[in-house]
Amino acid sequence: MDQSNYWYLQNIDAVGIFCPDKMMSRTDLHQEKTFKKGEFIYLTDDDSDRIYMLVNGRVKIGTFGDSDKEIIKAILGKGEVFGELALVSEGKRKEFAQAMEETEVCIVKKDDLPFLFRERPAFLQFFLRLFGNRILTMENRLERLVFKDSRSRIIDYLLELSEHKGERVGYEIVIRKFMTHQELANLTATSRQTVTTVLNDLRSKELIKFDRRRLLIRDRDKLAQELS
């Protein structure tokens, strides 16, 4: 897959920086922790003083709107970084991070970053790229929300998933650990019923196959044609 817009820099060993025990490096600059399914890694208004990298598992990033309605901003997987707004003097968290399954993370304290930036310039490049890609991702999602209808938003997001998190198997693309219909609805500002209707329609056209564990895109180009 083309990962130019993914939330990590391919040629930087983020694991070696965030989890230095795996590289026999300084271990006093990091912490490893495991969270159970449903456990919050941090909550809105918690101190924003740490940055996290996902070693295993999945994490949901979101906020709560009116009447405590959950608004999902992102669902992250292995190798992705979150909590990075601590770098821009965010005093308190403006979002929550919650483990969607048993999840292992490596943690770097904000106060240790200047040392890491000096010792490993590639780490600074990593965060510059991360922020740039985050901005592009948010701009794309805002454009999708403003200019596209519900069906197009759902299809467009499936295409985004296939590009960033898909694994090519022959002519098909598989996305493992696929999300629930409600989670997909939250991410695309649609309803669960609309998501179910669109996915079933795409399946009837033999463009996709899906279950609770994975999504299989049979032909990405033909799926993209559904947007025209």
Image: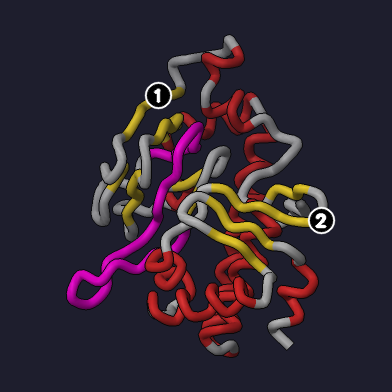
What amino acid is at disc 2? Tyr
- Is label 1 in a helix, a strand or a loop? strand
**Residue position for label 1:** 31
> In the image, is 119 to the left or to the right of 92?
right
Q: Is residue 140 visible?
A: no
Q: Residue at x 77, y 54 (%)?
A: 2
Quarter where residue 139 is shown: bottom right
How many badges with numbers are in the image? Answer: 2
Quarter where residue 63 is shown: bottom left
The answer to whether residue 42 is magenta is: no
CA gap between label 2 and label 1 equals: 41 Å
What amino acid is at disc 1? Gln
Residue 160's disc is none
Which SS type dominates the magenta stretch?
A: strand
The answer to whether residue 54 is magenta is: yes
**Residue position for label 2:** 171
Q: Residue at x 55, y 43 (%)?
A: 80
Position in image of residue 26 (x %, y %):
52, 14
Position in image of residue 178 (x %, y %):
51, 54
The answer to which of marks 2 and 1 sits earlier in the sequence is: 1
